[in-house]
Amino acid sequence: MKKVLCFLFLMISLLSYSQKDSLQLGDRYADDQLYLSVTYNQLYSQPTGVKGSGFSYGFSGGILQDIILNKKGSFSVALGLGYNYDFLNQALKIEEINNTPTFSIDENLKLNEFRLHAIEFPVEFRLRTSDANKYKFWRLYAGVKFSYNLHNKFNFTDENDASFEFSNITGFNKFQYGITLSAGYDLVTFHVYYGLKPLFKNGFIGAESVNTKLLKMGLIFYIL
């Protein structure tokens, strides 16, 4: 599997270089049309008394249509389509009883995590120092990312080693959005996603609403 992935990465890189080799300065061109990201995830705006998240991570990848807005190609807008997976190790206990989600704090849980699968739609406003013959350049991309949840699964293990699992709970906000920022040089680009919409709807712990949101920080790799 590793050999296959390495081969695919090499072929894509060669195609990227050959694409620019056929261009002349001043020609219109597109850059960064495929992306792959790996992130460290954290939950914020948690209810009072909920401790911070444990080690959590995410992966995403997809395609982007790079729409050039000037002749040099240094300014563009990109519209994309991709897949996203998030794993979260967290402290908020989530159950669903008779199609009604319930939220609580239980510090005695031995395991408490959830997994999300989503299709995503990134929109990026791009500023970069590239031209038709330059392979290495600085980039600063800001935008917004929309996503629609395809599947969610929550599971926990209590102090008696009893395990519970809930899938596609009705209280999950399937439609999500947040702002993004990517900045870097050549292959190394730092990436941040700041979720603006709560993950859950109509959730309460006592009188306090559950406004948990997602923050993701990591690296994003652009090619082609």
Image (cartoon, helix red, strand yellow):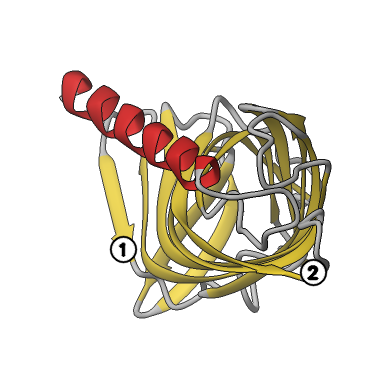
On the image, the x and y values in percent for residue 69 come to 79, 71
Question: How many C-alpha atoms fall within 10 Å of the one at disc 1: few (<14), some, or many (≥20)?
Answer: some
Determine the residue positioned at 51% across, 75% down: 174
In this view, the mark in front (1 or 2):
1
> In this image, 37 relative to 12: left or right?
right
Determine the residue positioned at 49% across, 56% down: 94
Question: How many C-alpha atoms fall within 10 Å of the one at disc 2: few (<14), some, or many (≥20)?
Answer: few
Q: Which residue is mark 1?
A: 167
Is residue 158 in view from this perspective? no
Instruction: Find residue 180 and name its label.
Output: none
Q: Which residue is mark 2?
A: 207
Disc 1, SS = strand
Please tell me which of labels 1 and 2 falls first in the chain.
Answer: 1
The amino acid type, in three-letter code, at marker 1 is Ser
Is residue 56 in view from this perspective? yes
Name the foreground residue: 120 vs 46.
120
Quadrant where the N terminus lies?
top left
On the image, the x and y values in percent for residue 202 come to 65, 78
Tell me how far mark 1 sits from mark 2, CA to CA: 26 Å
